[in-house]
Amino acid sequence: MAPPPPPPAGEHQPQLHGVVIITLPPPDQPSKGKTITAFTYSDDPAAPPPPQGLVMGYPAAAEPRRRSRRALSARRVAAMVLVLGALAVAAYYCFYSDMAVQFLGVEQEEAQRNETRSFLLPLYPKAGQGRALREFGDVKLAAKRVDDGGVKATNKMEVRRVAAAGTNSTALLPIKGNVFPDGQYYTSIFVGNPPRPYFLDVDTGSDLTWIQCDAPCTNCAKGPHALYKPTKEKIVPPRDLLCQELQGEQNYCETCKQCDYEIEYADQSSSMGVLARDDMHLIATNGGREKLDFVFGCAYDQQGQLLSSPAKTDGILGLSSAAISLPSQLASHGIISNIFGHCITRERGGGGYMFLGDDYAPRWGMTWTSIRSGPDNLYHTEANNVKYGDQQLGVREKAGSSVQVIFDSGSSYTYLPNEIYENLIAAIKYASPGFVQDSSDRTLPLCWKADFPVRYLEDVKQFFKPLNLHFGKKWLLMSKTFTISPEDYLIVSDKGNVCLGLLNGTEINHGSTIIVGDVSLRGKLVVYDNQRRQIGWANSDCTKPQTQKGFPFFL
């Protein structure tokens, strides 16, 4: 293409001026790239704009300027999108995690660990134990501790903190079991030399871990393993600090040669025996091993449902905040932080896992509420209100008042105060009129028959509403809510009826307290942090435990 002809002689020729600006990135941030800006101007203000066809002439230089500005605008838009996205993620973790304020202490805690190991304990299924268990549930809530003086013991010893311990491990144990028809979850531990396995019910409502013993045993159920046989040197003397913590100083016996105990549970069962001391063996997920000098109950006499025959467990695994509980003993030896948790699956086969230590306790995405202090070492919290869907289930004479809540993995079902229970039944009947009570079904105290075949909870859960326990606000905006979905309080019986796994607490002499049992703990990772005195939960399928460390942006 030929260049345009020169202007006629004597005619003023406009002078073109151009500027090109190149901006280079800082030397330490080359990823920001460079920018180029170009523009032109003429000393002839009346010059008309060049025709579009003169692409080879000087006036076409204005087009790159427009393209350059569009490219710069796109970068700004992209940067704004990235900034807004980062702010949204930060806001999510601030509002949905109470642990965000503890970020500054995370690295300091990690620096205090010289070695971190992980241990997993499975939860196993427990065989059904007949109609009595199905009707009232296993309630291993240690309602009363009895000693020779008949006085309830009080705690006289605190577990020392071990934040700077040389070895800080996490024990991760699989859990097996189900709510119906089995009624309990248990795990396996190894005690003695050589180590022998024992199946123990997982119980956050009990202080003391105990195993059936041949001491000799005067009243024991036939369990899955041989009875533990202690030697004389394994018996704990009364002067031991853990014995005094269990019995109370007022019952100290200087002339006694052993430390006796007797525990009565809320379901009227009991365990009696002596304290023993032996090695507990834990195997880490990375192959490492821990051996703990462990104090536990050597039980030689049981009463009530503990004598169910044949028994599928050998005893109880006490997980309360007491100094004699397993987590507290592990923490006092510097093996773990005094934190543990469990995750029970909703799957039909049951099971799940539990962990001892903090490696599997998520720092983000949890809802936390404070543990209330009490003389019984149970995991007390306080709910501001209870709702079935949007309907308030308050106590009439104490409208608007809070209600005590206990998290108890030793209870098969969830128990409600009488007034809340009666209001709930009325609300369910009003919202689900198509279900008729079937008094002939003795699976649970209240079972309904539908006017269509029912085989699975998926067939009926849409006709029921969630039960919500509200524990106040976090960040002054969002409610701390423990949601019990219909699949977490309903059970399909062998007759094809829908049975309510929420029971009246007056049946176990807990008419003013909510006891959250296994039926409502399924599908959730629940963490008991005895160091910060708080309980946390998050929804989970409980199939694969995961360690979660660090700030969420870098996960």
Image (cartoon, rainbow, N blue to C red):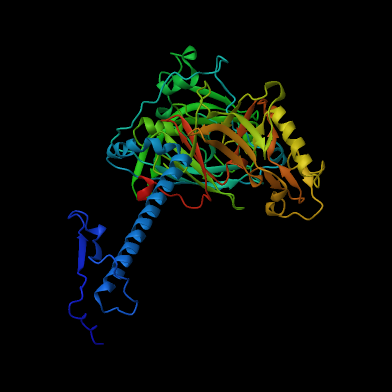
Q: In the image, 554: left or right of 528?
A: left
| Quadrant the N terminus occupies | bottom left
Q: Position of residue 174 (x, y in %)?
A: 49, 47
**Residue 448 against residue 372 in the figure, above or below:** below
Q: Position of residue 316 (x, y in %)?
A: 53, 35
Q: Position of residue 274 (x, y in %)?
A: 50, 26
Residue 394: quadrant of the picture: top right
* Front-most of residues 532 and 355: 532
Count of residue discs: 0
Asked whether residue 224 appears in the rendered view, the answer is yes
Q: What residue is drawn where x is 34% and y is 33%?
A: 334
* Front-most of residues 538 and 320: 538
Q: What residue is drawn where x is 67% and y is 38%?
A: 390
**Residue 372 against residue 279 in the figure, above or below:** above
Residue most extreme to the bottom: 1
* Front-most of residues 43 and 143: 43
Residue most extreme to the front: 10
Q: In the image, 228: left or right of 47?
A: right
Residue 429: quadrant of the picture: top right
* Front-most of residues 406 and 232: 406
**Residue 86 against residue 204 in the figure, above or below:** below
Asked whether residue 258 appears in the rendered view, the answer is no
